[in-house]
Amino acid sequence: MTQNYLCNFFRYFPCDFVNFYIFFLNLYTFLLLIFLPKWNIIINVAIATIFKISSGSSSPTIREVTRPELLAFKGSVYNMETITAILVDGGFYRKQARILFGEKNPKQRAEELTAYCHRHLRGDYENEKKRLYRIFYYDCQPSDKTIYNPLTQRSIDLSRSDQYRWTKDFFKELSHQRKLALRMGELLESKAAYSLNYDTLKKLLRKEIAVDDITEKDLTLDIQQKGVDMRIGLEIASLAQKRLVNQIVLIAGDSDFVPAAKHARREGIDFILDPMWHTVKDSLLLHIDGKEIKTGKPGENFKDKLCNIKPADNEPEE
């Protein structure tokens, strides 16, 4: 009977020993993380390796080792590496950049965009390290369609316009930027047309101006984008689902990304919005982890290195 007891004991002993060993190693690792924070990366790799071996799986990948739940905290101060993906709504950025930083050539605008995005990589806490995963830029190729101008009563070939050449050169310069990926949608050219500016239309209806007073500056070429918002939403979902990053910064100004932002937050992603001083709806602010703008307000950011707008002569510099 004693022999049977010993056999049963040793039959279950190895399993109990492995569980005890893992528990002891986790306790030892926790103590090391408190007193030796510089060893946190090595310890994380060791923990991930042990769990992989205990479950009979292959060696851990870098992505699994850097998951947020495997990274350490020391008190209330972050002691971790934040991997950040920055998503840029291109049409929105180009519009706001002209307001905030002034007119620039394609090369200057591309370098400005990269520099502005890198401002989001500055740590917010002591010992916090931020690393850029990639900048994703979403836009559409410029239209090369011929459109009728109702004011001049002439057809205009957009492929010969200065805006067409500027946009083409801008995308070319962006493709040369480090860690920047272009994601192109399409233009809904079937509904492309000139339209009156809102203020001009109000004055015309109030009979403050006549039709003969309308100039080409009062007209806007309206071409809608197709597929850009969908691509941004899919990118957010993919980054969150695959746990490739633990922070997403979205540079945009509308609330079309609420479902994607909610999904990312449910997956544990720190979701930051940068509206570049554009008015944002409350429906979007309710579903993000913070709003960060990396420049001053329009008219107050003259000292920003990215701004080439000079203050008015009658407006004293601070």
Image (tube, rainbow, N blue to C red):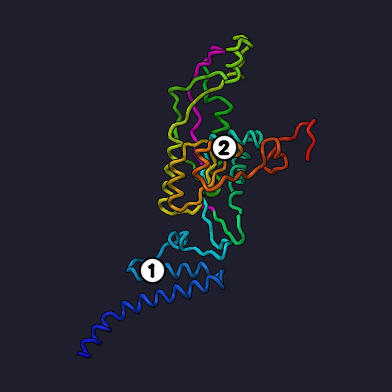
**Region in magenta:** 132-154
Q: Look at label 1 and name its amino acid.
A: Phe
Q: Main secondary structure of the magenta part?
A: strand
Label 2 crowd bin: few (<14), some (14–19), many (20+), radius 10 Å: many
Q: For residue 262: magenta?
A: no
Q: Nearer the viewer, mark 2 or mark 1?
A: 1
Q: For residue 145: magenta?
A: yes
224 up-or-down from 304: above or below: above
| Left or right placement of residue 91 versus residue 298 in this view | left
Query: How far from the left and from the top, in percent, is residue 247?
Result: 51, 52
Q: Look at label 2 and name its amino acid.
A: Tyr
At 43% from the left and 61% from the top, the residue drawn is 64
Report how far apart the C-alphas of labels 2 and 1 lie in the structure: 44 Å
Mark 2–mark 1 CB contact (< 8 Å): no
Q: Which residue is mark 1?
A: 51
Most extreme residue toward the bottom, as rendered?
2
Query: How far from the left and from the top, in percent, is residue 292?
Result: 59, 45
Most extreme residue toward the left, as rendered?
1
At 63% from the left and 45% from the top, the residue drawn is 294
The quarter of the image holding the N terminus is bottom left
Q: Is residue 246 visible?
A: yes
**How many marks do you count on the picture?**
2
Query: How far from the left and from the top, in percent, is residue 230?
Result: 43, 38
Q: Nearer the viewer, residue 258 or 2?
A: 2
Q: Which residue is mark 2?
A: 93
